[in-house]
Amino acid sequence: MVKRLLSALLRAEVFVTSNQDEAKAIVARRLGFEMPYLDALWKGSRFKVSLPQELLLAMEDQSRWLMSAGLTDRTEVPDFLDLIYLDGLKAINPEAVSTIH
């Protein structure tokens, strides 16, 4: 099931990249956005299915922040690699996984 979901996301990535105007029209219609607003959002967006190392680092940073702010009972940063299923994306598109594991 995970591989099917990831395959669909990868097809959506190709569609958005290859058919930007049509993709914007779909999003505008489905979400009720005006095109100037959507254009502004679109410029700052990256439509890429990936598991980059930066994601893992950001999750660790957020965990440290939660602990320092007293917003969690945890005292150690979790090992997020134990919580991320890399094999599904690696099986479909290995280049999309740049997480060190």
Image (cartoon, rainbow, N blue to C red):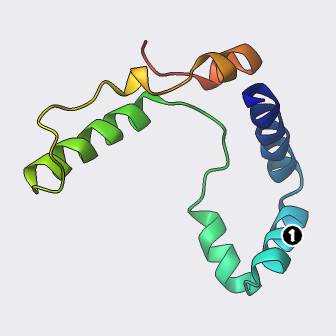
Q: Which quadrant: the C terminus?
A: top left
Q: Who's the residue at 85% across and 62% down the image?
A: 23
Reply above or below: 7 against 87: below
Q: Who's the residue at 83% across and 39% down the image?
A: 8
Reply above or below: 93 against 69: above
Residue 18 screen position, x and y as percent = 87, 48
What is the crowding at mark 1: few (fewer than 14 residues within 10 Å), some, or many (at least 20)? Answer: few
Reply above or below: 1 against 65: above
Front-lying residue, 88 or 71:
71
Q: Which quadrant: the N terminus?
A: top right
Residue 62 screen position, x and y as percent = 26, 47
Among the 4 quarters of the image, the one containing residue 95: top right
Front-lying residue, 83 or 57:
83
Residue 24 screen position, x and y as percent = 81, 68
Q: Is residue 99 left or right of residue 48?
A: left
Among the 4 quarters of the image, the one containing residue 69: bottom left
| Residue identified by numbered label 1 | 26
Label 1 SS: helix
Residue 89 screen position, x and y as percent = 67, 23
Q: Is residue 10 left or right of residue 51?
A: right
Q: Amino acid at mark 1?
A: Ile
Q: Who's the residue at 17% across and 56% down the image?
A: 71
Q: Who's the residue at 49% across and 30% down the image?
A: 52
